Structures are given as C-alpha cells and as structure tokens.
C-alpha cells in the first residue's frame, strides 16, 4: 500500500481540515505570546491530545528533522519563582512553537486563563470542534483513545 493510501493519511487530512476551521474562527485574534501556556508547571494546566493529534505532532517533528536539541529549547522565564516550569519540549528559544502548523487543537484554542477572559469564539463552538477531533481519534484508535496530557507525551 502506498503511503498516500494509508487510512491514517485520510484521517490526518480530516484533522488538518478541522485545524483550518479552528484557525479561521480565531483569525485576527491573538494573545500576548508570553509562552506561559507552553510551560505547564507555570499555569498548572496543559492541553490534552488525542492519538490522531499526537500522530500529526510526531510527523511534524520527523519532517523538521527530529526533536529540538537542548540548546534550541526555550529557556526558563525569569522571576516566576517556579522551580519546574515543565516547558513543552516543542517550544524553541525564540518563544515559538517548533511544530506550529501541527500544534494540537488545545494549543490553537488558547486554553490559558488569561486568554479565555477575552475568548473571541463561544465556548460551545470550541467544545464542538474538540468533539470532532475526538471522533477522528476514535476512528484512528480502535476503542477511541481520547486524550493524554501533552506534557506527558513530550516527556516533561
Ligand atoms: S505544542 Fe507548541 S503551542 Fe503547544 S504547548 Fe507545545 S510549544 Fe506550545
């Protein structure tokens, strides 16, 4: 079977279409880019990712040439007083997500408390988009693997 015909490729294409819808809904809206939401020990929350989102992340890491080397990973923020920021292994030193185009839906929908105060998309719409991703994951993983903590998947 050619790579283009693998069932997971079709699911990834569906995931990409959902991501595009999500991005369109949040178009023109942004946050202060503090990178705090990518430091799970700082916020106490982190995105949960489904199996199909994780596959998209793995493919993006592979496409980029492998995991970030330590010298390219984000440094700790100064003055937080937090001992272990649990920084996502995909955040680079410039404060950017190194797999931005493939970031999970949780990262696209601004899950941090600061952002949700000014959320431009109704919560019900976000939940509906998450539900669609979960349906995809259920088709990807028999029995429906719905979510894991991103930090755990990234080893932080
Ligand atoms: S995947 Fe990217 S956007 Fe999401 S927490 Fe990690 S670095 Fe931040």
Image (spheres, helix red, strand yellow):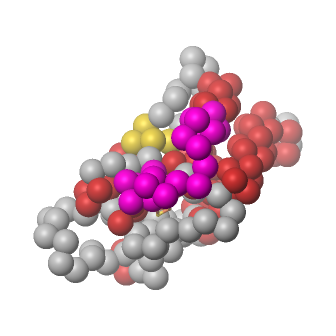
List the single residue furthest toward the top.
143
Q: Nearer the viewer, residue 6 or 51?
A: 51
Q: Nearer the viewer, residue 22 or 138?
A: 22
- Residue 59 in picture, x, y percent from top left: 63, 54
Q: Nearer the viewer, residue 1 or 83?
A: 83
Residue 102: quarter of image: bottom right
Task: Tell me if residue 9 comes above or below residue 23 in the rendering.
Answer: above
In the image, what residue occupies the spot 59% across and 55% down?
Answer: 120
Q: Is residue 1 visible?
A: yes
Does 128 lie within the magenta span? yes
- Residue 147 in picture, x, y percent from top left: 48, 34
Magenta residues span 110-130
Residue 53: quarter of image: top right
Does 115 lie within the magenta span? yes
In the image, what residue occupies the spot 18% across and 78% down?
Answer: 79
Labels in figure, total: 0
Residue 95: quarter of image: bottom left
Task: Tell me if residue 154 comes above or below residue 139 in the rendering.
Answer: below
Q: Is 35 left or right of 126, judged from the image as shown?
A: left
In the image, what residue occupies the spot 63% across and 33% down?
Answer: 128
Q: Is 56 left or right of 114, judged from the image as shown?
A: right
In the image, what residue occupies the spot 19% across and 62% down?
Answer: 84
Q: Is 69 left or right of 132, judged from the image as shown?
A: left
The quadrant the N terminus occupies is: top right
- Residue 143 in picture, x, y percent from top left: 57, 17
């Amino acid at each position: 079977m050619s790579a283009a015909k693998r069932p997971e490729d079709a699911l990834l294409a569906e995931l990409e279409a959902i991501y595009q819808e999500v991005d369109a809904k949040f178009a023109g809206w942004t946050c202060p880019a503090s990178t705090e939401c990518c430091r799970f020990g700082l916020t106490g929350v982190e995105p949960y990712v489904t199996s199909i989102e994780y596959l998209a992340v793995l493919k993006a890491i592979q496409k980029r040439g492998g995991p970030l080397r330590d010298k390219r990973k984000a440094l700790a923020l100064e003055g937080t007083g937090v001992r272990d920021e649990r920084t996502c292994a995909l955040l680079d030193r410039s404060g950017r997500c190194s797999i931005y185009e493939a970031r999970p839906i949780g990262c696209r929908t601004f899950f941090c408390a600061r952002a949700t105060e000014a959320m431009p998309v109704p919560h019900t719409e976000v939940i509906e988009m998450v539900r669609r991703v979960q349906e995809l994951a259920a088709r990807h993983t028999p029995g429906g693997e719905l979510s894991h903590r991103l930090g755990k998947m990234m080893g932080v």
